[in-house]
Amino acid sequence: MSDTNHVWRLRKRPVGELSDDVLSYESEAIPEPAEGECLFRLNYLSLDPTNRIWMSDMDQYMPPVELGAPMRGVVCGTVVKSRSPAFKEGEVVSGLGVWADYQVGAPGMINPLGDTGPVPVIDAFGTFAVVGPTAYFGLLDIGDPQPGETVVVSAAAGAVGSIVGQIAKIKGCRAVGLAGSDDKCRWITEELGFDAAINYKTEDVPAALAKACPDGIDVYFDNVGGDILDACLKLMNFKGRIPTCGLISQYNATEPPPGPMNYPMILMQRLKVQGFIVLDYAERYPEAIADLSKWMGEGRIKIRQDVVDGLENALQTLKKLYTGANTGKLMIRVKDV
Amino acid sequence: MSDTNHVWRLRKRPVGELSDDVLSYESEAIPEPAEGECLFRLNYLSLDPTNRIWMSDMDQYMPPVELGAPMRGVVCGTVVKSRSPAFKEGEVVSGLGVWADYQVGAPGMINPLGDTGPVPVIDAFGTFAVVGPTAYFGLLDIGDPQPGETVVVSAAAGAVGSIVGQIAKIKGCRAVGLAGSDDKCRWITEELGFDAAINYKTEDVPAALAKACPDGIDVYFDNVGGDILDACLKLMNFKGRIPTCGLISQYNATEPPPGPMNYPMILMQRLKVQGFIVLDYAERYPEAIADLSKWMGEGRIKIRQDVVDGLENALQTLKKLYTGANTGKLMIRVKDV
């Protein structure tokens, strides 16, 4: 164990695009676990769109990170010292931690990852910790897609979106994805089996959506909000469903952007728009992991990870999420396990 | 039977506020019922916010009224000639008809009103045809209010809103209403039993709402959209519900207004926003009518009707809905029954 810890701390609430001074990267002492806690060393740090929310003081679903406090993140690590019967030294754990090499964890927030079978730890963590269950419960529990229906997903080459489209196909739906480059569009149609893809940066989105969804949209899995939400609202079918998973198009806005112009479609078409956070489904995780593992084993769900080495690169890497520079699950690797 | 019929016909799609030339009032021949239809004479014409939608060609839940066609409306009349076993001469019928003294109706669209017991026909039609079931199903089926929760309703002195608040009280909730005058506010608190009322025309709505809802809002029954929706979104509790019944604040807009700024609260608080139209619940009407009749009989639901005589006054009277000049159910009376 080295003597020095590295910790990212929140220094400023972000305004507009993430700047380099919102977090600072500090060398600090390694903390001591209290009774009931463990000390673990970071293997992987998940980078997620919601990180930007936690840095801000906008209304949100958990208290924002306090100024000066370590940045919050979904982490995977290896226990180096345990003062709790819940953790064994050398065991791999994951959960809600902080952006730090060494950190303490208590049961509930940090839990053993368990046996991942033939699936490498990095894939299991990358897929099962956040994005897989997010796609699974948002689409199936709120979206309730029926065979033959049309499911549209934004940020479709992202970690969540790419899984949403593949589950939609497994459920017998037409899957249409919006992504930000021709490469991404090719990947989701040619490799992942989406029926159609729209490059939202180069195409006329309303026209392309109308063409890709000749029977309208039954489920729109919303990762982005903004103009794409508006274009989808316009095409929603009677009693359509909109699971609201993210609104990444507006997280970097300096002024609150207006809501969707086509909001009245909620009334006209009797839509259901419902927000969710994957943590709401914590108790049902095993259900998602069982199905996802099976589908991954059968080759029906393919995942792609976008892995960057080095905790010191976390902030620069996080920025990729908001410019669409990543494909698949974005994470920092400190040390493979 | 007089020889002349009077019919309101749609002449222009409305732009902005309703103008006098959107409809014309014509003297015409009385139509002849075809086989399977009846001819009936109008007793009461219900005036509803949605009339403005039917005149427009905005995206909507039924085909808009065609230019030149008779204006659509919810009607109550007396059968004068029947060519269907479904209708008896002299019988009172109601349903979806047109703004005309004499008109033909077919089963399905027009149905016998049935025995209204001790309730006068005008009250039964005014409460049970549209507004009662709208309040009932929107609040109970989508809003699902639990005892002790806070229910907020906009247009609370309107026909639907006044019933929503009273049902909320019956269900053990705190009921808070927004209305457009001090008289209306007094009526809903002093006579209808709302816990608090806010005059949205004179008070600071966000501040007044925060004060009236110290525990936040669990159900916001939305009749209006716009700024009031935004103010309510800001105060919604975790897993709150927003039945979307109407968006009257924007029906007269000439440009599509922006959607709610606080749309991200749907995600942050995991809200459910769901649109509905009372026609979706047509099969379950008896359920609503049974409960509403019982509550009205017990004096737990009070209704107020705003009745104007003369079909020729229909268009001028309809305008009252969009300026908030009515209190309770607005309707035209041609002839009592």
Image: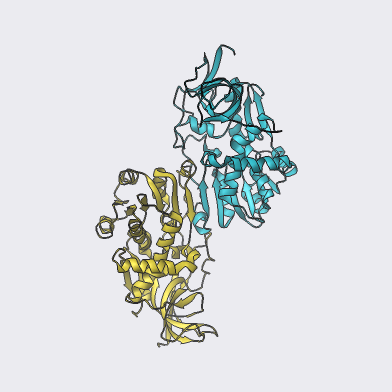
Chain colours: A cyan, B yellow
Report whether A143 appears left or right of A193.
left
> For residue B7, what is the image quadrant?
bottom left
Question: Which residue shows up at 52% across the image and 53% down it?
Answer: A272
User: Which of the two residues, B332 or B217, is positioned nearer the viewer here?
Assistant: B217
User: Which of the two residues, A85 or B288, is positioned nearer the viewer here?
Assistant: A85
Q: Residue furthest top?
A: A3
Report whether B15 appears left or right of B175.
right
Q: x%, y% of residue A102?
A: 55, 19
> For residue B78, what is the image quadrant?
bottom left
- Does the image show residue A61? yes
Q: x%, y% of residue B302?
A: 30, 65
- Does the image show residue A301? no
Image quarter where the N terminus of chain B lies is: bottom left
Please determine whether, in this image, residue B166 is positioned above or below residue A320.
Answer: below
Q: x%, y% of residue B32?
A: 50, 85
> For residue A296, what is the image quadrant?
top right
Image quarter where the C terminus of chain B lies is: bottom left
Please determine whether, in this image, residue A119 is positioned above or below residue B222.
Answer: above
Q: Residue furthest front?
A: A85
